[in-house]
Amino acid sequence: MRGLLGVLIAACVCIGSSGAAGAEDYPARPITMIVPFPAGGATDTLARFLSERMRTILRQPLIIENITGAAGSLGVTRAVRSPPDGYTLSIGTSTTHVLIGGLYALPFDLLKDFEPIILIGSEPLLIISRNSLPPDDLKGLIAWLKANPERASVGIAGAGAMGHLTGIALQKATATKFQFVPYRGNAPAMQDLLAEQIDFMIEPASNFLALLGSGSVKPFAVTGTARLSSVPKIPTTDEAGLPGFHASLWYALWAPKGTPKDIVAKLNATMTQVLFDPQVRQRFDQLGIQTSPIDQQSPEALRAWQKADAERWWPIIKAASIRAAE
């Protein structure tokens, strides 16, 4: 009997030791990072750039898996249903991890069924117009919109996209009215803007850098709290006459709910190290992405950030009765 008891005790010790060793040795095999958008897009480009730097620290390759459709909700669903072992990560944006919660009846809780890892950075939006639009600054644009209600047309990258919701918020903040023209993405909307078929757009800054460089569009303001180093002459909304009006597309990293805390901590520490790299910051500047401040790089900070964004945008989606196109 004593011999059997000894064997059982030894087995328990071994199981406990192997679990601890497994956590210490993580990662022991390649990690999959799910990107909920097509290859070649902004999120995919960012994911591939960051994964190469994570690989050198974690000493394991990170495999990018693009799962697209339904505003990113298909990829997010695939990630949330993955085993919580640290070998499947979900990189996404404010669209995929906040806005879809107001646009779709999801089979999971977007705010509770992920373990937040880190807020990577944010990309403010730019308010731009066709060159022939009469106003030359943001105050002039607002005055023109008030003098011409329902006359202006705004191109949006689909119903419920960040530019759409920011446009609704702009109408509320300025007591103006204008028409939204939905497109299948930013590219066709920009083509119509250049052809002067629509009047203006409010979309992530990186979409317009080439057009701004060629002088093809007229900029009014950046919807962030600081000017962009890539286009430093464009004022913020605070400076341009609309204080407190801010909106951004942000990027972050999550793991499925139940992923061990020590693995989440190791992934957070890895990404913190990556974001501190001067070359990474330089690349972010080129992409128009503002690295998240150090005090906002904890998992707890991302959870609070995500919750606050949902509390801001979900009521706007509900009040406007917006439903995403299937």
Image (cartoon, rainbow, N blue to C red):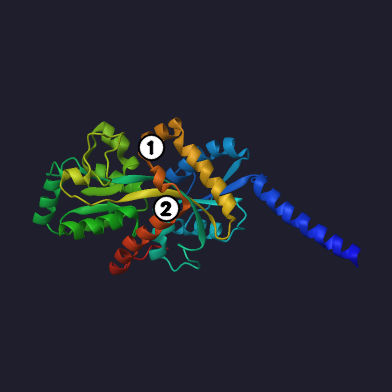
Q: Which residue is mark 2?
A: 301
Residue type highlighted by circle 1: Leu
In which quadrant will I find the N terminus? bottom right
| Image side of residue 24 versus residue 75, left or right | right
Give x and y (percent) for residue 9: 81, 61
**Residue 80 quadrant:** bottom right
Q: Name the residue nearer the viewer: 306 or 223.
A: 306
Q: Residue at x 15, y 41 (%)?
A: 132
Q: Which residue is mark 1?
A: 287
| Image side of residue 254 versus residue 171, left or right | right
- Labels 1, 2: front one: 2
Give x and y (percent) for residue 274: 49, 37
- Mark closest to the chain's N terminus, 1 or 2: 1
128 lies above or below 76: above
| Image side of residue 104 versus residue 267, left or right | left
15 lies above or below 130: below
Residue type highlighted by circle 2: Ala
